[in-house]
Amino acid sequence: MLNVIRKLQRLFKSPAYELVFLSIRSNLLFVFINLLTNVLCALLEGSSLGVVYLAVSSLTHKTNGETTDKFKLPSFESLDINLQLSPEQSFLWLVILALCLQLLLSIFSYTNKVVTAQISAKAQTFVTGKVFEQIMLFSYSCASRYKIGDLVMYANDAALAVDRQIEEINSIIINIAFSIAYLYIIIVLSPALAMAASIIIFFAILLQYYLAPRLRRLAQRVTSEQVEVAKSITENIQGLRLIHTFGTQEQTIRKIKKLLENYKHQLIMRSYLYYSSEPLLDIMPLAALAVLSIIAVLSSKNYSQIMPTLLTFLLALQRLATRLKSTSITATRFADNSGRMLRLAAILNRDDKQFEHSGNQRFNSLQGDIKFNQVSHSYTKNGKFVLHDLNFDIPRHQVTAFVGESGAGKSTILDLFLGIYQPTHGTIYVNNLPFTELNLSDFRKRVGVVSQDTFIFNDTILENLRYGNPESSIKEAISCSKLAYAHQFILSLPDGYKTVVGERGYRLSGGQRQRLALARALLKKPEILILDEATSSLDSESESLIQNALEKIKYRYTVIVVAHRLSTIVNSDQILVLKNGKIVDKGRHLELISKSQIYKRYWDLQTSVASP
C-alpha cells in the first residue's frame, strides 16, 4: 500500500498534473458545484432507495392484517413517521416521492456533467496553450531535436489527455460517493449480508490492483507506436513533392503500413487486458445476488417480513455492483490514459530543455555599428568549432556581404546574430551592449529576414505580407510590394492581394515567393535587413528584379547579405570572405579582385560559367 501511495505522489507531482490542478484551482466555483452535486446525487440516490423500502413495507404491512386507519411506517431506526393514510395511499405517495427524488437526481446529475465539461474545457485549452507556449519558447537547437510531427502530436494530444483524465477523476468521485450511499443502506438493512457483499468489493479491488500496472505499460507502448505513425505520416505529407518526383510512393506506403501493423498489434494486446475485468465483474453481482437471496429466504420463515428488506437490499447491492464495475472500468481507463499523460509531462518538464535566452534591455533602434569580438562557436559541447575568433564590424546603414564555400560558417554567423544560438566564446555587441543583455523579441521585431527557403502561409497575399506587421494598411503593403517588384505579379493573380497562395505558397513561382518575402520584410519596417542566399535559386530575371529592389532601398537599412552568387554583392560596402570558419579577406569588390586569391577564384569561376 505504501508503494502505491508513493507512486501516486510521483504521478500527481508531474508537470502535466500540476498544470491540470493549476487550471482547476483557477475555477474553484465550478469545482465546488461539481463536488456539491456529487454529494447531493449520492444523498438523493440513497433517499430514493429508502423511500422504496418504505413503499414496499406499506404493502406488506397490510398483508399482516394490521389496522389500516392508522398506519405506522417501518423506518431506518430513528425514522418514525405517523400518517393517517391507508397502505395503498402510502404506497402511492411514496412512489411519487421516489420519482421526485429521481427527478432531482437527474437534474443534479445533468448539472454535474455540464460543470465537469466546463472544467475540462478550461483545463484543455489552458494546458494545450501551455504546451504550445513551451514549444515556442524552446531554443531553436532544442526544438530542432524533435520532428515536426512529434511536436504536433504533443500539442494535439494535450487536450485529449486532460479531457479524459478529468472525466475519469470525476467518474471515480461519483462512483465512490454512490458506493458509500449504497453501502450505508446495505449495512443498515443487514450487517450480516453486508459482510457477504464485501466479497465483491474485495475481488474488484484485487483485480484492478493486478491489471492497472500492466495496462499502464501497454498504454505507453500503444502511445509510442501511435506517435511514430503520426510523425511519419506528417513528415511524408510534408515531403509529398519529393516523394512524387522520386517515384517512391509504394516504398512510403510500405513503410507506413509496417508502422501501422506494429500499432495494430499493440492495440490488440491492449484490448485483451483492457476488457479482461468485465466478465468477472459482470458475473460477480449476479452470483452474489443469488447467494444472498437464498441465504435470506432460508434464514426466515415469514417472507412478508423480510420482503421489504430483501428487495431493497438486493436493489442497493445490484446498484453497488454496477458502481463498482464502473469504478473498475474507470480505473482501467485512467491507467490506459497514463501513456498520454506521461508524454504530456515529458514535453512540459523543463529540466532537460533549453529555452531562448533574452535580456531585459529594450531595443528601439540601431544606434551604431554591430561588433563581433573574438566570437567562436561549436554546436556541441565537445564538438568541432565552426567559427574561430571572429573580429569584425557591421557598419550601420551600409551593406555587408559574407561569401565563402558551403560550410564556411556564413549561416552560423546569421544564427548567432539573430539569437538562434549563443556564441560558445566571445561577445556580439549591439549599441555597445552585449547582445545577451538585449530583449530578444524587441531586437527581432527590428530585423527583416529573406532566406533561400521562404516560408509562405496558406493564406492571402495580403495576410502573408502583414505577417510581421499586422496593423499595416493596404497602401503600405502595396508600396512595399512595388519596392520589391512584386506588385505587378500580384495584380495578375486571380484575386490580386486577396489571392490564397496555397500550402507553402505552391501556387507561386520561386521568384514570386522571394519577391513576396522581400516585400513582407520591408513592410515590417526593419532597422536591419538580412538576405540569406535569397537569390541563389532564382532565374536571371527574378535575380535582376531583386537586385534592382535592393539598390533602391539598401541605404535605408543596415543590410547583411549571404550570397553564393557574387553578382548580387558587387556593390556592397564591405565583403567578408570566409574559409573554414575564419575571415581570410575583407574589402570591396574591386579591392578583393586585386588582393584576394580566394575571392578572385570565386569570381572567375562564376563569370566564366556565365560567359557564352
Image: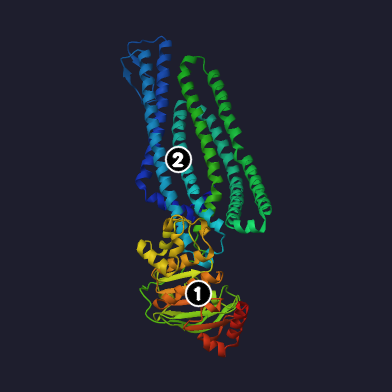
| Residue type (three-letter) at the residue carrying disc 2 | Ile
Of residues 543 and 184, which is closer to you in this image?
543
Label 2: few (<14), some or many (≥20) within 10 Å? some
Please indicate, yes or no, whether residue 422 appears anywhere in the rendered image. Answer: no
Residue linked to disc 1: 414
Q: Secondary structure at mark 1?
A: helix
Of residues 605 and 219, which is closer to you in this image?
605
Label 1: few (<14), some or many (≥20) within 10 Å? some
Quadrant in the rendering for residue 377: bottom right
> Closer to the N terminus: mark 2 or mark 1?
2
| Residue type (three-letter) at the residue carrying disc 1 | Leu
Residue linked to disc 2: 173
Of residues 345 and 198, which is closer to you in this image?
345
Q: Position of residue 491 (x, y in %)?
A: 43, 60
- The quarter in which the C terminus is drawn is bottom right
Say if 386 sits above or below 258 in the image. Answer: below
Q: Position of residue 265 (x, y in %)?
A: 66, 45
Mark 2–mark 1 CB contact (< 8 Å): no
Left or right: residue 594 compared with residue 130: right
